[in-house]
Amino acid sequence: MVMKLNRILAVVCVLGIAQFSFAQKLVEVGAKGGLNYSNLNMSNDGRLYSTYYHAGVGYHVGGYALIQFKKIFIQPELLYSNQNQYFTTPYYSNLKTTLNYINIPVLFKYYPTGSLNIYAGPQLGILANSTGDLNQIQNGFITGPPVTNQNLNSYLKSTDFSVVFGAGINLPANLNLSIRYTIGIVDINKNSGGANFSNGLEPSFSTAYTRNQVFQASIGYALRKFGK
């Protein structure tokens, strides 16, 4: 946990230094939040046997800065993101996997006309915590009831990398709306490709190649605007 906090602080410091260095081009700083519609994009090979997966609703909250470079804007953000997935096995339904990340997207934003904008960029995700329902597996088959609400950190990699695509619009009263799609580009499963689970308990993603995928709808508020 201390290591994760150190990573977060290091990234925040880097962002702070960057903001200070380009302060003369800082356009605004603000807060934002909204809803997630998330799922885990898993390879067919390695999934739990005869299991159906469903996207879940979560939330995100955090802040952003907007920096101008001629006609291009750069928007770094710091977000806490709650990402859920539901799944149904042959004998049990409404099981859940929850991953909570500290996400740090750095977005390149362009205004093609008026207040309408489009953007894209990379995102670093730092796993804050995770919980889920574990399944009792023997010889590839579910042999007993799930063990619910267990810590999944030992099954997951501590960092995630994604690509973000989205669009937004600025509104009166310092408000802004945006939608985006975030697709993970790295495998977050420590046990993908095959593993021997010593306790016989497996998470929803089992040994599948696993990536995050999230749709987000956000509302933001510019806490302070600066002269362009």
Image (cartoon, rainbow, N blue to C red):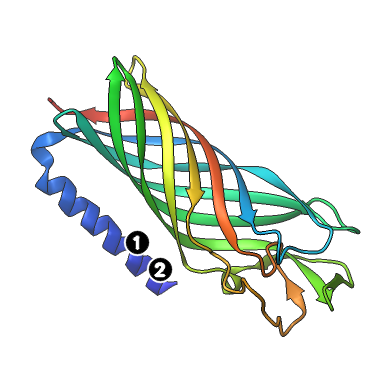
In the rendering, at what x and y percent does residue 136 appear? 82, 73
Q: Is residue 224 left or right of residue 181?
A: left
> Which quadrant does the C terminus fall into?
top left
Q: Which mark is residue 4?
A: 2
Q: Is residue 44 left or right of residue 223?
A: right
> Which quadrant does the N terminus fall into?
bottom left
Residues at circles 2 and 1 in contact by the CB criterion of under 8 Å: yes
In the rendering, at what x and y percent does residue 28 appear? 23, 32
Query: Helix or strand or loop: what does disc 1 sit on?
Result: helix
Q: Is residue 17 left or right of residue 189?
A: left
Q: Residue at x 55, y 53 (%)?
A: 212
Q: Where 3 falls versus 196 (above or below)?
A: above
In the current view of this chain or complex, which residue is farthest to the bottom? Answer: 198
Query: Helix or strand or loop: what does disc 2 sit on?
Result: helix
Residue identifier under label 1 = 8
Q: Where 96 falls versus 141 (above or below)?
A: above
Residues at marks 2 and 1, CA–CA distance in whole angstroms:
6 Å
Q: Name the foreground residue: 149 vs 112.
A: 112
Q: Amino acid at mark 1?
A: Ile
